[in-house]
Image (cartoon, rainbow, N blue to C red):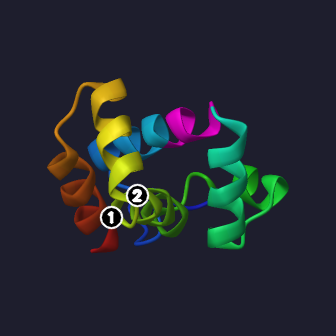
Amino acid sequence: MTAIGSSDEARPEASVLSLAALGWLLEDGERAERFLSLTGLDPDTLRAAVGTAATQVAILEFLANHEPDLLRAAEALAVAPEEFIAAMEELKQ
């Protein structure tokens, strides 16, 4: 478990958006498989590391690197696509 305030702990707002994005991308089996394949994660590793900033950045980078998914996720979650990018940048700090 990561101590509060450690550099590896995700920031709350960006973290929430990242987790919402993960929920969205896991709704589709093909998209979920592509995510796991491209990130090199497996389901167990994803479960264990989902609370870390690095994993949350990987989720948002996955969307940022495929505009159709970025736009669909933004529409589904009722946020601007730029909010995903801003959250990703925040989590990288």
Magenta segment range?
A: 22-27
Q: What type is the residue that disc 1 sits on?
A: Leu
**Cβ atoms under marks 2 and 1 closer than 8 Å:** yes
* Mark identifier at residue 60: 2
Local secondary structure at mark 2 = helix
Look at 36% across and 25% down and name the residue there: 76
Query: Which of the two marks, 2 or 1, is nearer to us in this view?
Result: 2
Image location (x, y in percent) of residue 5: 38, 61
Magenta: main secondary structure equals helix
In the rendered view, would you say 77 is above or below 48?
Answer: above
| 38 displayed left or right of 21 | right
| Residue name at image x 48 percent, y 58 percent | 56
Q: Which mark is residue 74?
A: none
Quarter residue 60 falls in: bottom left
Q: Residues within 10 Å of mark 2 (few under 14, many from 20)?
A: many
For the residues labelled 2 and 1, the Cα–Cα distance comes to 10 Å
Q: Which of 37 and 53 lies nearest the eye of the viewer?
A: 37
Please state, as top left, top right, bottom left or bottom right, where the N terminus lies in the image. Answer: bottom right
Q: Residue at x 50, y 69 (%)?
A: 54
Question: Would you say 65 lies left or right of 47 here?
Answer: left
In the foreground, 39 or 12: 39
Residue at the spot of label 1: 91
Where, by quadrant of the figure, is residue 52 drawn? bottom right
Judged from the image, the secondary structure of the residue bearing numbered disc 1 is: helix
